[in-house]
Every structure is written in structure tokens, then in C-alpha cells.
Image: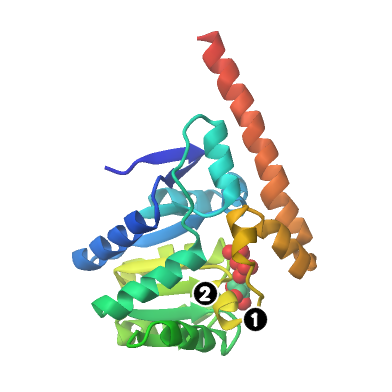
Amino acid sequence: MRKRVTILGVAVDDVLMDDAIAAVARFIADGGPHQIVTINPEFIMEARRNCAFRQVLAAADLATPDGFGIILAARWRGTPLRGRVTGVALTERIAAEAAQRGWSLFLLGAAPGVAERAAAALQRANPGLRIAGCYAGSPHPDDEPAIRERILAAKPDVLLVAYGHPAQDLWIARNQPILRVPVAMGVGGTFDELAGVVPRAPALVQRLGLKWLYRLLVQPWRWRRIMTAVPLFLWTALRERRSFNESHAQE
Ligand code: UDP
């Protein structure tokens, strides 16, 4: 049974990293197509206005809590989550397990050459890791048939897609009925981080839940997105809590 918490209309699984990896192993053993989404505040704000994205998140086989904002909002609702499972951390752990268990990975997306560099970094950290393929491609629908051909030929166990949200998650949902990869996950800027294109936030900054502030400093042109993502999300979640408490008080 999945234990889930709903934040502003989006369900998130209450999983820790070991639970997420156990789910990945189950999906691969099952063999059918599965989709993983990593829910951060930006995902929830997008889902509020984008019905197709909201449906994809709701239908996902695993929705991990990615980001401190999600943890805070869950706590405010009185339905705390046990911890975070970010896209980058899950990718690294999947790579480590893959090297042990023989799973193969396909890295799709990011700027040309970045997926290859990210794959090389994962292989350096995990000797023996099998990379089924790397390809930048593009999320444009015209490119889908050619991308599908590559993935079908490579037969990966895990497909990681870095086209940013919501494009990557919609791409997976559209193509999984044909690809039928056991595990497909949208990973946002993960390849950029692994390849060193974007500097990684120090561990302490991540532990303090301040990665959004770090991103604001290293990628200041993203300020509008980040401000929507974090302060506006928290404000909206706080307002929801107030109306939630008021409606309960009236009962
Ligand atoms: N990207 C891409 N093609 C596109 C749009 C984005 O390959 O048309 C890649 C981009 O190079 C980056 C990733 O998708 O590697 C998006 O990273 P971001 O951190 O913006 O992800 P988000 O936070 O939006 O999920």
C-alpha cells in the first residue's frame, strides 16, 4: 500500500531513498512500463495551472518528495513526510544499484554532449555501470519517432529524461505506451549537475533546505521561476493550511 500525502492537490509518496530503490527494483522485476516523478514546489505550482501535467503526476507509479518546501508544506498540513528523495540523489543511487545488479541506463536530454559527460561521471563513481545510450535529442514532437527508435534499440532498464518539467514528464507519459521501459524518470537539471555544467550546492546548503537560494545565486536569471517556486508555493501552502484548519474547526 502506498502512503501518500496530498499537497495543493498533488499526491506525494511518503518514501525514503531505500523505499524508492525498492520500488525501482520492483518495477524492473515486473517488466512493464513505469514512470517516476520527483515533486518539487515548481511542479506543484505548474500542476495547479496545467491539467495535462496534473494528470501525469497523479498517474505516476512513484512520486518522490523533492525539495524542502514539500517537507514544510506536508508538516504544516499535519501529515508529515519522512524525508526527501531528490532527482539527483535518486539518479546517483539508481546508478550505484545498477552497477551492482546489472541494470542498464539510457540518458536522454540536456544540451549536446552533456548526457555523455553525466554518464561518464556516473561510470567513474560506479565501475561496471552499463550505459545503454546517451542522446540529447529535443522534446519537440517531431523528434519523437527517431528518439523512440534509439531507445527501443538500446532496451534500457532505466530511462532518465532531462528536458525540464513539465516537458520531460509529459514526454515520458506520451511515449511510455510504446517504449515500455521498466523505469522512466524525469530528472530536470541532473545531467547538468553530474557533468559539472552547473555547480553543485554544498551538502550543508542542501541539508539546510537552501538549494533554491543557492540556485538563485549561481543562476540569477532564473529568479522569476525560483521566486514562483519557493516563496509563492509556501505562501499558497500556508493559506491552504489556514482554510483546512478553519473548515475542520467548523465541523
Ligand atoms: N532541456 C533540454 N531541451 C529543452 C529544454 C531543456 O535538453 O528543450 C534540458 C536543459 O538543458 C537542462 C534540463 O533540460 O539540462 C532542464 O533543467 P532544469 O534545471 O531547468 O529542470 P527543471 O527544474 O525545469 O525540471
The amino acid pointed to by label 1 is: Val
At x 51%, y 67%, the residue is: 88
Question: Does the rendering let one see residue 60?
Answer: no
Q: CA distance from mark 2 to mark 1?
A: 26 Å
Q: Mark 2 — residue?
A: 141
Of the four image quadrants, the one with ligand 1 is: bottom right
At x 32%, y 82%, the residue is: 152
Q: Mark 1 — residue?
A: 197
Query: Residue 189: where, in percent of width, then height?
Result: 58, 71
- Relative depth, front residue between 86 and 222: 86
Relative to 220, 188 lies left or right: left
Q: Quadrant of residue 56?
A: bottom left
The amino acid pointed to by label 2 is: Pro
Relative to 60, 210 lies left or right: right
Q: Earlier along the polypeptide chain: callout 2 or callout 1?
A: 2
Query: Residue 121: where, in percent of width, then height?
Result: 49, 85
Secondary structure of the residue carrying tag 2 is helix
At x 57%, y 85%, the residue is: 114
Tell me the number on the disc at residue 147: none
Secondary structure of the residue carrying tag 1 is loop
Query: Residue 177: where, in percent of width, then height?
Result: 33, 66
- Relative depth, front residue between 148 and 70: 70
At x 37%, y 61%, the residue is: 35
Relative to 118, 199 lies left or right: right
Question: Does the rendering let one see residue 131?
Answer: yes
User: How many numbered discs?
Assistant: 2
Could you tell me if the residues under marks 2 and 1 are in contact, i.e. CB atoms within 8 Å?
A: no
Residue behind label 1 places its C-beta within 8 angstroms of ligand 1: yes
